[in-house]
């Protein structure tokens, strides 16, 4: 597979798909409360995607090689779960932190975004991890522009994360996205400036760092999907789909309930 570059029509399609992915996360936001099960959130997400957005849930039956088909419409990763947590009938409880990752397909184009949700009141350490991971994602986004290197993005995220005592998961990365869910290139969340592929206007990529409070090592559970931290430390992730432009970037998955853009990002992008 090769990198795809979106023309005006492709960009228009990606803007719509991205906006709807953000809208789906907005719709789910008030549902995330103590006592709700992730299966309930999953069912409502799939209904909303079909009936309101007129779109398709990309994760459902997604089966990359070496994997059994993913059984649900969204991913819900709680506490020490890093990513690809499968919704189930266990209620969320006060103090949990949960990543909800949604990917929708609208008119053939994919929009992919995830956010952290804090269930009731969480520990200071949990809230700090969620907030710093959000900032780490934005440090990566800020590197995006025509001519920048993928290593610039990874380096910015890694430097910020490790500078705050957090570790970067290596085994999973951001990705090109378009008419396919996962396209080239891989967008690593660690690396060295000036290395790897150069970004070009018209590319659409995701930036989706997974940061752990403890060590970076992970393992996969027996369900063939759920990834957890080996040391059972907390893990957080945020994800946006981003268009590369001549002068910088356009975040395609912003929506009314997206958290505020960090001040450092507003300042440097103004
Ligand atoms: N949404 C995830 C990503 O950001 C991929 C989930 S694949 C699934 O790339 F099958 F687990 F849904
Ligand atoms: Co993604
Ligand atoms: Co995703």
Image (cartoon, helix red, strand yellow):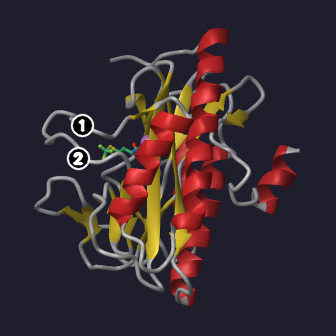
Q: Which residue is mark 2?
A: 71
Which label belongs to residue 61? 1
Comes first in the chain, label 1 or label 2: 1
Left or right of 228, for residue 28: right
Query: Residue 249, labelled with which disc?
Result: none
List x then y, in percent, for residue 91: 35, 76
Report the number of discs: 2
Figure quadrant, ligand 2? top left
* Residue at horizontal 53 percent and vertical 65 percent from the top: 31
Callout 2: helix, strand or loop? loop
Q: Nearer the viewer, residue 51 or 264?
A: 51
Q: Is residue 201 visible?
A: no
Q: Quadrant of residue 153?
A: top right
Percent across and percent down for residue 193 are 56, 44
Q: Which residue is found at the position 86% from the left and 54% from the top?
A: 267
Task: Give the residue at x 64% y 45%.
Answer: 141
Q: Nearer the viewer, residue 68 or 148?
A: 68
5 over 190 or under it: above or below: above
Q: Nearer the viewer, residue 6 or 150?
A: 6
Q: Position of residue 150 (x, y in %)?
A: 52, 37
Q: Residues within 10 Å of mark 2 (few under 14, many from 20)?
A: some
State which quarter of the image contains the N terminus. Answer: top left
What whole-number distance in Å separates the C-alpha atoms at marks 1 and 2? 6 Å
Label pair 1/2, CB-CB below 8 angstroms: yes
Q: Report the side of 156 relative to 92 (left or right).
A: right
């Amino acid at each position: 597979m090769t990198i795809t570059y979106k023309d005006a029509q492709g960009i228009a399609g990606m803007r719509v798909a991205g906006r709807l992915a953000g809208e789906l996360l907005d719709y789910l936001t008030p549902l995330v409360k103590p006592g709700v099960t992730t299966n309930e959130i999953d069912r409502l997400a799939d209904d909303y995607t079909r009936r309101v957005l007129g779109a398709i849930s990309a994760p459902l039956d997604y089966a990359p090689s070496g994997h059994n088909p993913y059984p649900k419409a969204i991913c819900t990763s709680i506490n020490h779960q890093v990513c690809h947590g499968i919704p189930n009938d266990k209620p969320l409880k006060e103090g949990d932190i949960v990543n909800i990752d949604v990917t929708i397909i609208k008119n053939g184009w994919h929009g992919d975004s995830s956010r952290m949700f804090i269930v009731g009141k969480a520990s200071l350490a949990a809230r700090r991890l969620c907030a710093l991971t959000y900032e780490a994602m934005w440090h990566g986004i800020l590197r995006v522009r025509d001519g920048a290197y993928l290593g610039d993005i990874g380096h910015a995220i890694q430097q910020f994360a490790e500078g705050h005592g957090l570790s970067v998961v290596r085994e999973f990365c951001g990705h090109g996205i378009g008419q396919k869910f996962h396209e080239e290139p891989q967008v690593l969340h660690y690396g060295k400036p000036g290395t790897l592929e150069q970004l070009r206007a018209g590319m659409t990529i995701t930036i989706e760092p997974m940061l752990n409070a403890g060590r970076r090592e992970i393992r996969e559970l027996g369900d063939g999907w759920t990834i957890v931290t080996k040391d059972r430390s907390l893990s957080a992730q945020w994800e946006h789909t981003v268009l590369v432009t001549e002068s910088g970037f356009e975040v395609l998955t912003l929506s009314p309930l997206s958290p505020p853009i960090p001040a450092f990002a507003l300042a440097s992008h103004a």
